Image (cartoon, rainbow, N blue to C red):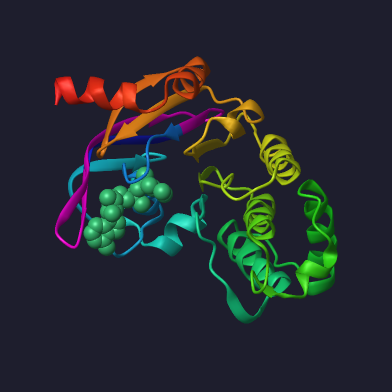
Amino acid sequence: MLEIRNLHATIDDQEILRGIDLKVSAGEVHAIMGPNGSGKSTLAKVLAGHPAYEVTEGEIIYEGKNLLEMDPDERAREGVFMAFQYPVEVPGVSNAQLLRLAYNEKRKHQGLEELDPLEFKELLAERAKLVDMDLSFMSRSVNEGFSGGEKKRNEILQMAVLEPKLAILDETDSGLDIDALRIVADGVNKLRRPDNAIILVTHYQRILNYIIPDYVHVLYRGRIVRSGGKELALELEEKGYDWIKSEAGVTA
Ligand code: ADP
Ligand code: MG
Ligand code: MG
């Protein structure tokens, strides 16, 4: 589904990603971990097509196509979904409006009829249950006045509505209390399928107790310095990141 080869990316002429290689197949969940500032959000944003980042080297192949040649809208239409670490507020646009727009955009792309507001309302009500979200959130402006946890839940609701092929979740666990974490993780687990893949960016091991990854990768200073199975996350939890830093320091 996704193959990243020797990816280098800069922001404001500063190199942040320094040669990333990663392969993700359908049905897999990959956790990207690493200390603050290692480039996790940068990698997520480059995948989503954020215009502030410049890819200076390498390639990203998504479903056999050059992802870097696709603009962010095109990526979204092709099933790439990104849940941001800091979800944006969209005053004046209701959650239901935005979701229906995005959902119908996808339907059109698939050659299907658009859903009218009533039909969509039913679908939305059903998906909202996945993340245990009250329907009152649907008529409110997108993320406006939402608590941190509600914003994260709303990101997973968007994912539940859009049913992406490739979902990139950037620290969806940060700022969640334990109940919200469980709800978010349950929502994500219900959306796991043999034909989709999830890249889960996280700083902490905690969420990986609920969303069991197939692979764990540690990003440090813009490179993946270690990959393993879910046990790698436990090892990190136990030893912290200093262990990785000193190892990477020796080989750098
Ligand atoms: P992470 O998500 O792993 O915490 P980020 O991808 O957010 O890390 O950031 C990686 C590095 O890029 C950090 O050192 C950060 O300071 C740097 N960075 C982010 N934005 C800019 C910018 N606009 N100019 C220069 N450096 C930046
Ligand atoms: Mg960070
Ligand atoms: Mg980040």
Q: Observer-nearest residue: 163 or 109?
A: 163
Quarter of the image with the C terminus is top left
On the image, the x and y values in percent for residue 109 come to 56, 60
* Residue 193 shows up from this direction: yes
On the image, the x and y values in percent for residue 75 come to 44, 55
On the image, the x and y values in percent for residue 17 come to 24, 44
Q: Residue at x 32, y 46 (%)?
A: 37
Left or right side of 1 for 134: right
In this view, 121 is above or below 97: above
In this view, 219 is above or below 240: below
Left or right side of 170 for 42: left
Q: Quadrant of residue 244?
A: top left
Quarter of the image with the N terminus is top left
| Residue 110 highlighted magenta (yes or no) | no
* Residue 116 shows up from this direction: no
In this view, 143 is above or below 131: below
Q: Residue at x 73, y 70 (%)?
A: 96
Q: Residue at x 69, y 68 (%)?
A: 100
Q: Observer-nearest residue: 6 or 193?
A: 6
Extreme residue toward the bottom, this view: 92
Tally the marks.
Answer: 0
Q: Quadrant of residue 54?
A: bottom left
| Residue 29 highlighted magenta (yes or no) | yes
On the image, the x and y values in percent for residue 151 come to 64, 60
Boundaries of the magenta span = 8-31
Predominant SS along the magenta part: strand
Left or right side of 227 for 14: left
